[in-house]
């Protein structure tokens, strides 16, 4: 709580600053628009995360009808090139085929490897960058991402985002109620916000920042929540939320999300 009130102080200080810098935000928006994935932060269900909503710059500016023409050219992904790299890798550069683990069209066969199908492009490219620069630590993916260029990452993301979303099943009938309660409404008494506020009611996520969670392997999502909780994986918003979740709550919400679509 102390932490979040500090953030809200910061956020308040930021308001006038955001006002006078709106021209830069507009430019940032233009490049987001060029990336073809406008960010749409959701309205926050709980006061505990209200600061995060204010932090997302796009929420406070309304987009101009026409983007400035002289905005810097953003790299664009090519889904066809991405598909070939995903399926075959590139032996000449040491790129391993993603399909080996993540399955055809991003639908992995076992929980060891996350499903990537229909995941938002900007999120996917960001994760690959994070593996490459080591800010997201995983021995397998760090080695693989090291062989990828920025353009490869965008191409792979452009291919994956177009695939049909995964369909899974609720994993544990006994904890559906708890899982659904947390996902849809959070736990106000513990300052846990509703997951749906950022990841959307059906788990599809909200491009560009908030990843799709619906239909993902429960074991994978539970592991990621544990990583956010102990700080192994860093993201200000998720770290603040995960520290408040008990093991039981992590498992219930991950089991529930596996069936969301
Ligand atoms: C040897 C198996 C293996 C191969 C090959 C592989 N991955 Fe992965 N990938 C993993 C594992 C395991 C994880 C989960 C790592 C973690 O917990 O952070 C993962 C995670 C990811 C994630 C993060 C997903 C999320 O929801 O945040 C992305 C993106 C990804 N891989 C993309 C790729 C791409 C693109 C390729 C091909 C260039 C690839 N992977 C090849 C095993 C593999
Ligand atoms: C304030 C917005 C916000 C809320 C509320 C929120 N999340 Fe997240 N979540 C994020 C962001 C942003 C990321 C991506 C982090 C990154 O880029 O590494 C994320 C990532 C995740 C991931 C990792 C997905 C992957 O593919 O690796 C899981 C799992 C997750 N959230 C679960 C939850 C659960 C469960 C809740 C509710 C208890 C929740 N989130 C509430 C913003 C939020």
Image (cartoon, rainbow, N blue to C red):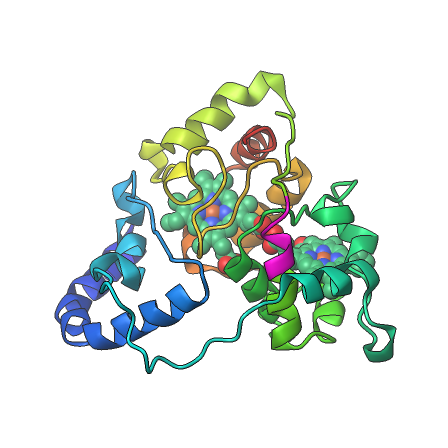
- Residue 132 drawn at (x, y percent): 65, 73
Which quadrant holds residue 219? top right
Does residue 249 lie above or below 236 as drawn? above
Q: Is residue 162 magenta?
A: yes
Which quadrant holds residue 200? top left
Q: Is residue 176 magenta?
A: no
Does residue 11 lie above or below 254 as drawn? below
Q: Is residue 103 left or right of residue 216?
A: right
Name the quarter where the C terminus is drawn. Answer: top right
Q: Is residue 207 left or right of residue 109?
A: left
Q: Residue at x 49, y 37 (%)?
A: 203
- Residue 40 drawn at (x, y percent): 35, 52
**Residue ranking furthest to the top:** 174
The reply to whether residue 78 is in sight is yes
Magenta stretch in the rendered image: 158-163
Q: Is residue 24 left or right of residue 151?
A: left
Q: Residue at x 54, y 58 (%)?
A: 121
The reply to whether residue 239 is in sight is no
């Amino acid at each position: 709580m102390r932490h979040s009130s500090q953030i809200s102080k910061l956020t308040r200080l930021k308001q006038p600053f955001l006002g006078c810098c709106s021209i830069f935000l507009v430019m940032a928006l233009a490049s987001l628009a060029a990336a073809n994935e406008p960010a749409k932060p959701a309205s926050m269900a709980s006061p505990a995360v209200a600061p995060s909503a204010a932090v997302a710059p796009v929420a406070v500016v309304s987009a101009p009808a026409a983007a400035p023409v002289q905005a810097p050219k953003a790299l664009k992904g090519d889904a066809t090139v991405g598909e070939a790299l995903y399926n075959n890798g590139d032996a000449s550069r040491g790129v391993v085929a993603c399909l080996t683990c993540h399955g055809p069209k991003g639908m992995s066969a076992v929980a060891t490897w996350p499903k990537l199908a229909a995941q938002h492009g900007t999120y996917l490219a960001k994760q690959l960058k994070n593996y490459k620069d080591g800010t997201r630590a995983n021995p397998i993916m760090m080695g693989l991402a090291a062989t990828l260029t920025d353009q490869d990452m965008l191409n792979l993301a452009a291919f994956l985002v177009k695939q049909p979303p995964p369909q899974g099943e609720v994993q544990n009938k006994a904890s559906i109620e708890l899982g659904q309660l947390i996902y849809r409404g959070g736990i106000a008494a513990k300052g846990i916000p509703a997951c749906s506020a950022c990841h959307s009611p059906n788990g599809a996520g909200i491009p560009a920042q908030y990843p799709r969670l619906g239909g993902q392997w429960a074991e994978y999502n539970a592991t990621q929540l544990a990583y956010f909780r102990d700080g192994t994986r860093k993201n200000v918003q998720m770290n603040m939320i995960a520290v408040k979740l008990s093991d039981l709550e992590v498992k219930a919400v991950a089991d529930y999300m596996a069936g969301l679509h």
